[in-house]
């Protein structure tokens, strides 16, 4: 997975970058996917990029960091900024996540508003629609309404959903898609790209994300830990990669990377959930996470997982900072 030292942040343009033979009509810029929790933003990001760059889960509030995926075509380069789901915050962490989304929205070139077709338009969607309307009054940004999870409903229900989206606000475009089946994913990418400014590529060919490897590893561990646990646990789970060291004494053709990771929860009862009876659950988490990390790094690793209690870390400014929020 390619990374790049220089970072073309949203709102900036690199002058004089090589276009790689691209035409003067080439477009490049930043697109942000927003939506209430579990609206399919991360799954759509991965589908648009063509590789896993954002963790997904059936649990809401999975995304904690803005994760960039880069989708490059012969006519455009769409840099996707995935964000936490906008929601009415109940904790200091929730407030900070919302602030992160709002800051991102002010810097990107186009916004994709994800509304899952398998769920009725609800208060959460209305809350975000109002936020976007307010944002557009401050700084004009095109908004494309995306009916995600279109494969999960029949045509009649999808048509009803599209009409409800149309009535929710004023959108520059409305398009249904399914990231799981791949239906209309390319069309979503092309619609987003049409609202980007004319610009040379901001990232070289082959770069899929600029997210640091340690963050990606932490996210893969958190994704594995979220599967099959109680609904309240995702909000209480944080992961920090403490150490990555090549093991000494290994043959050059068979290197092994030792990866030490701490999983933080807020209460001892949650620690017991993650570990499971006799450590069975933690072993399963380790096995699943290790497969993803080895695929990411392209080498064998030994994953050393530790579960620790950081009491009420979501409400403690010092602990939030220590855990990277």
Image (spheres, rainbow, N blue to C red):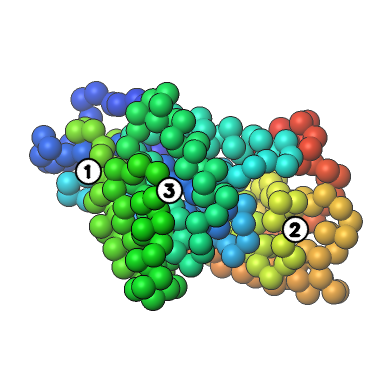
Mark 2 Cα shell of 10 Å, populated few (<14), some (14-19), many (≥20): few
Q: Name the spot of residue 103 as percent of width and height, x first.
A: 50, 30
At mark 1, the secondary structure is: helix
At mark 2, the secondary structure is: loop
Q: Residue furthest right?
A: 268
Q: Name the spot of residue 105 as percent of width and height, x first.
A: 45, 34
Residue occupying the point 67% across, 41% down: 89
The residue closer to the viewer here, 156 or 251, is 156
Q: Point out the tag, 1 or 2, that comes first from the N-terminus.
A: 1
Residue occupying the point 35% across, 66% down: 159
**Residue at the disc numbered 3:** 168
Numbered circle sitting on residue 40: none
Vertical arrangement, residue 204 with respect to residue 102, above or below: below
Q: Name the spot of residue 129 as percent of width and height, x first.
A: 47, 42
Residue occupying the point 25% across, 39% down: 195
Count of labels in the image: 3
Vertical arrangement, residue 198 with respect to residue 219, above or below: above
The residue closer to the viewer here, 89 or 103, is 89
Cα separation between marks 1 and 3: 23 Å
Q: Name the spot of residue 60 as percent of width and height, x first.
A: 62, 57
Residue occupying the point 74% across, 58% down: 233
Q: Is residue 34 visible?
A: yes
Cα separation between marks 1 and 2: 40 Å
Q: Are marks 1 and 3 in contact (CB under 8 Å)?
A: no
Quadrant placement of the C terminus: top right
**Residue at the disc numbered 1:** 194
Q: For residue 305, which quarter of the picture?
A: bottom right
**Residue at the disc numbered 2:** 232
């Amino acid at each position: 997975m390619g990374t790049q030292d220089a970072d073309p942040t949203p709102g900036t343009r690199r002058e004089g970058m090589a276009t790689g033979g691209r035409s003067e009509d080439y477009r490049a810029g930043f697109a942000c996917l927003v939506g209430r929790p579990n609206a399919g933003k991360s799954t759509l990001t991965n589908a648009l990029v063509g590789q896993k760059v954002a963790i997904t889960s059936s649990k809401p509030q999975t995304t904690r960091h803005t994760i960039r995926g880069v989708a490059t075509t012969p006519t455009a380069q769409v840099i996707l900024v995935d964000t936490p789901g906008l929601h009415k915050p109940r904790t200091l962490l929730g407030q900070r996540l919302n602030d992160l989304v709002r800051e991102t929205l002010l810097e990107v070139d186009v916004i994709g508003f994800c509304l899952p077709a398998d769920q009725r338009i609800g208060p959460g969607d209305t809350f975000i629609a109002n936020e976007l309307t307010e944002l557009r009054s401050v700084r004009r940004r095109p908004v494309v309404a995306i009916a995600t999870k279109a494969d999960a409903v029949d045509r009649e229900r999808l048509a009803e959903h599209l009409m409800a989206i149309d009535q929710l606000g004023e959108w520059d475009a409305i398009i249904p898609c399914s990231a799981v089946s791949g239906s209309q994913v390319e069309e979503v990418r092309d619609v987003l790209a049409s609202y980007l400014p004319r610009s040379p590529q901001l990232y070289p060919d082959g770069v899929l994300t600029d997210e640091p490897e340690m963050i990606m590893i932490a996210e893969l561990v958190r994704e594995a830990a979220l599967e099959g646990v109680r609904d309240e646990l995702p909000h209480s789970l944080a992961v920090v990669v403490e150490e990555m060291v090549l093991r000494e004494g290994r043959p050059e053709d068979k290197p092994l990377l030792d990866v030490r990771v701490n999983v933080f929860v807020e209460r001892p009862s949650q620690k017991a959930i993650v570990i499971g009876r006799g450590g069975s659950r933690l072993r399963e988490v380790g096995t699943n996470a290790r497969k993803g990390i080895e695929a990411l790094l392209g080498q064998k690793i030994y994953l050393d997982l530790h579960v620790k209690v950081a009491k009420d870390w979501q409400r403690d400014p010092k602990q939030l900072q220590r855990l990277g929020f």
